[in-house]
Amino acid sequence: MSRFRDSFDQRVWQVVKGIPAGRVMGYGEVARAAGFPRYSRMVAAAMGRCPEPLPWFRVVRSNRTLAFESGSAEYREQAQLLRLEGVRFDGGKIVEAERDDSLDRVLWGPRD
């Protein structure tokens, strides 16, 4: 495995692990938060290589829809896991509460 991929994977995993319950991030947002703003397509692959379970279901498309085909088993599983955390859907899109800086606090600590 290359050093770049190792570093990329580790940073993606850290970001995904830090997504609070009931919140979601887009693949591009995860890539940017990991420090690799142009690598959104590699985020899913990095998540698939993680040696431990990640809250994969909290990562969605940038338009706040699920990445799986509507009605598929994967789609139903992701939607159910998100609903269990209190995420609401409207017309197939995720409806989130007002954003706060909780993810920044998880990743970087409290602001001074």
Image (spheres, rainbow, N blue to C red):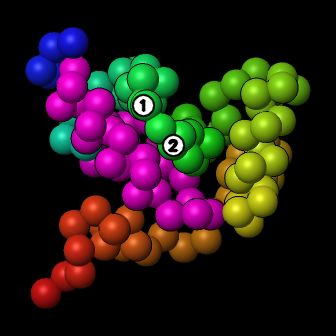
Identity of the residue furthest to the bottom in this view: 112
Dot 2 crowding, Cα within 10 Å, few <14, some 14–19, many 20+: some
Residue 97 in the image: x percent, y percent? 61, 71
Q: Is residue 38 above or below residue 64?
A: above
Q: Which mark is residue 29?
A: none
Does any portion of residue 107 appear in the rendered image?
Answer: yes
Name the amino acid, label 1.
Cys
Query: Does the magenta stretch mainly form a helix, a strand or a loop?
Result: helix
Residue at mark 2 = 54
Identity of the residue furthest to the top in this view: 1
What residue is at 40 percent from the left and 73 percent from the top? Answer: 102
Total marks placed: 2
Residue at mark 1 = 50
Judging depth in this view, the residue of 18 and 67 nearest the camera is: 18
Looking at the rendered image, the quarter that the C terminus falls into is bottom left
What residue is at 53 percent from the left and 40 percent from the top? Answer: 53
Name the amino acid, label 2.
Leu
Residue 50 in the image: x percent, y percent? 42, 31
Give the magenta part as a residue range.
5-33
Judging depth in this view, the residue of 9 and 59 nearest the camera is: 9
Q: In the image, 70: left or right of 31?
A: right
What residue is at 71 percent from the left and 63 percent from the top? Answer: 85
Judging depth in this view, the residue of 63 and 36 nearest the camera is: 36
Judging depth in this view, the residue of 28 and 85 nearest the camera is: 85
